[in-house]
């Protein structure tokens, strides 16, 4: 049974609050994307399986835990997801990274895919799809459908900000995918932007507006 988890950690709420401020600089915004992604990843990896290994401390032999299998893969949805992936790689540096390029048509709000490159053994991996914004849900739904078409089954979705409309659509389209959300906002506006939101995440990360 999949779950939707909304983060209530004070650090996440504090940092997302700074990201919402329109005068927050590109550099600070970018740094915060990586930091909040890392904090959400901490929760999203809570159920990873562990196995026992024998080691020697400087004093005795003992048994310690390690992540079983070590088959993880982060899949950022370009562009804005890219910097979330960088933050998460600080926590799980040996994860492989796949990329899905997707942008929203500004009039129809439909996602347009322009790139997909995944590790050759992606179907054997536990996948963390990352994108800061879940608005209508179209981009996340299309990206996850693309993964499932390649026989990938163990999928989690991580975002910084979600609209209720997007959460509902994603849950309906992919009920098997766990969703981790930094902040659940109020609604979408008439242009498909999240309110109160933080604006266009990609533009704010890369300074393109
Ligand atoms: O839930 P949706 O309605 O599909 O909207 C969310 C998408 O919109 C943004 O990407 P955008 O299209 O602006 O591309 P960018 O990352 O290149 O800026 C965001 O990063 C998501 O991918
Ligand atoms: O509010 C929104 C909605 C979609 N994409 C963004 O970057 N921001
Ligand atoms: Mg954008």
Image (tube, rainbow, N blue to C red):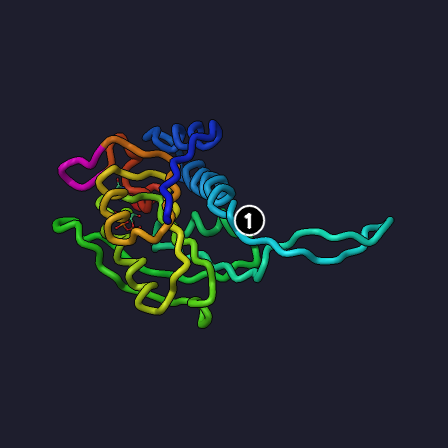
Residue designated by label 1:
90
Query: Is 188 inside the magenta-drawn segment?
Result: yes
Give the residue at the far front of this rendering: 1
Whether residue 205 is visible to the viewer of this picture, yes or no, is no
Whether residue 106 is visible to the viewer of this picture, yes or no, is yes
Give the residue at the far right of this rendering: 59
Q: Is residue 90 above or below residue 181?
A: below
Percent position (x, y) of residue 32? 45, 38
Residue located 57% across and 59% down the image: 94
Question: Looking at the rendering, in which quadrant would you find the C terminus?
Answer: top left
Image quadrant assignment for residue 27: top left
Magenta span covers which residues? Answer: 187-193
Can you tell me whether the CB of the residue at mark 1 lies under 8 Å from the nearest atom of ligand 1? Answer: no
Percent position (x, y) of residue 55? 77, 56
SS under mark 1:
helix
Residue located 39% across and 54% down the image: 129
Percent position (x, y) of residue 144? 31, 58
Q: Is residue 123 above or below residue 45?
A: below
Residue 205 as seen in the image, left or right of residue 196: right
Main SS of residues in magenta: loop
Query: Is 81 inside the magenta-drawn segment?
Result: no
Residue 49 as seen in the image, left or right of residue 27: right
Percent position (x, y) of residue 81? 38, 50
User: Which of the two residues, 111 or 6, is positioned nearer the viewer here?
Assistant: 6
Residue located 24% across and 53% down the image: 173
Residue located 23% across and 47% down the image: 169
Query: Badge 1 local density, few (<14 within 10 Å), some, or many (20+)?
Result: few
Q: Is residue 113 above or below residue 28?
A: below
């Amino acid at each position: 049974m999949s779950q939707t988890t909304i983060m209530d950690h004070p650090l996440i709420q504090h940092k997302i609050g700074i990201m919402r401020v329109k005068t927050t600089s590109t550099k600070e915004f970018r740094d915060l994307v990586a930091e909040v992604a890392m904090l959400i990843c901490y929760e999203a990896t809570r159920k990873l399986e562990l196995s026992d290994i024998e080691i020697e401390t400087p004093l005795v032999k003992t048994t310690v835990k390690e992540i079983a299998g070590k088959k993880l893969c982060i899949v950022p949805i370009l562009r804005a997801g890219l910097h979330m992936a960088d933050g998460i790689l600080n926590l799980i540096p040996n994860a492989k990274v796949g990329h899905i390029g997707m942008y929203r048509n500004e009039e129809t709000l439909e996602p347009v895919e322009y790139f997909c490159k995944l590790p050759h053994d992606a179907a054997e991996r536990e996948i963390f799809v990352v994108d800061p914004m879940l608005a209508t849900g179209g981009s996340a739904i299309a990206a996850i459908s693309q993964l499932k078409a390649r026989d990938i089954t163990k999928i989690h979705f991580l975002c910084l900000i979600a609209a209720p409309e997007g959460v509902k659509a994603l849950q309906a389209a992919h009920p098997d995918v766990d969703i981790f959300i930094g902040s659940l906002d109020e609604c979408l506006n008439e242009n498909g932007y999240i309110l109160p939101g933080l604006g266009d995440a990609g533009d704010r990360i890369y300074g393109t507006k």
